[in-house]
Image (tube, rainbow, N blue to C red):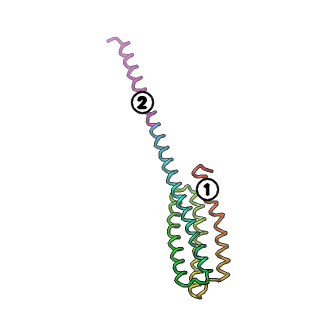
Amino acid sequence: MDPGVIIGAGIGAAGGFGGGFLALLTQTKNIKAQHDAERARWLADVRRETYTAFVTATKDLSKALWRASDQLHDTDAGTSDWQAAFREVHDAWTVFSAASAAVTMSGPHPVAERADDLRHAMRYWEMLTGAWINAAISHGDGRTPEYHDRFTDAATAKRPKEAAFQSAARKALGTE
């Protein structure tokens, strides 16, 4: 056999192998890029859902706390009204707490930190409201200025924490 043919066949085989290898590398790179893009979209969707649920739960808990305050100021309200308000606040806290945990799991870290800051502020407000309701039940009157003032201060204190969470969430979602 002619050595030129053998060398030509070897070069052709090497070229075919090299071309196939480059095609495989390119295909693998494209599949990885597609996988990474799909994962990024999935993570953005998960984060958007958890952040939205957290904001909704925050608003629902706030609403329950303000309703409890209204009940405590109502001269026609009594023990059963205050107990119902306590249950409503507790139920809203349970949903809020779960939503908070979902945010801390879905991240990223700066958003989880802001969610935790807001959770602490909401927990203080919720605990204060519970103490106010218990005091009203014990004393038969919910119109106590010391609780009202602390309640209002707690409501005011959570606002910047809520704004900080929303800002961090927008940054994480790329909508800022």
**Does residue 69 show up magenta in the picture?**
no
- Give the image location of residue 106, x and y in percent: 51, 56
Above or below 149: residue 37: above
Would you say residue 55 is visible in this rendering? Answer: yes
Above or below 138: residue 19: above
Q: Which mark is residue 21?
A: 2
Mark 2, secondary structure of its residue? helix
Q: Nearer the viewer, residue 39 or 52?
A: 52
Q: Nearer the viewer, residue 129 or 12?
A: 129
Q: Which residues are magenta?
A: 1-29
| 23 relative to 79 in the view: left or right | left
Mark 1, secondary structure of its residue? helix
- Give the image location of residue 22, x and y in percent: 44, 30
Q: Which residue is mark 1?
A: 168
Residue drawn at (68%, 77%), measured in percent from left and top?
149
Disc 2 to disc 1, how far (Cα)? Answer: 44 Å
Quarter where residue 4 is shown: top left
* Amino acid, disc 1: Ala
* Amino acid, disc 2: Phe
- At label 1, counting other C-alpha atoms closer than 10 Å, the crowd grade (few under 14, some 14-19, many 20 or more) is many
- Quick one: which residue is furthest to the left in this view? 1
Q: Which mark is residue 5?
A: none
Would you say residue 128 is visible in this rendering? Answer: no
| 4 relative to 154 in the view: left or right | left
| 109 relative to 22 in the view: left or right | right
Instruction: Mark 2 or mark 1: name the one nearer the start of the chain.
Output: 2
- Quick one: which residue is furthest to the bottom in this view? 139
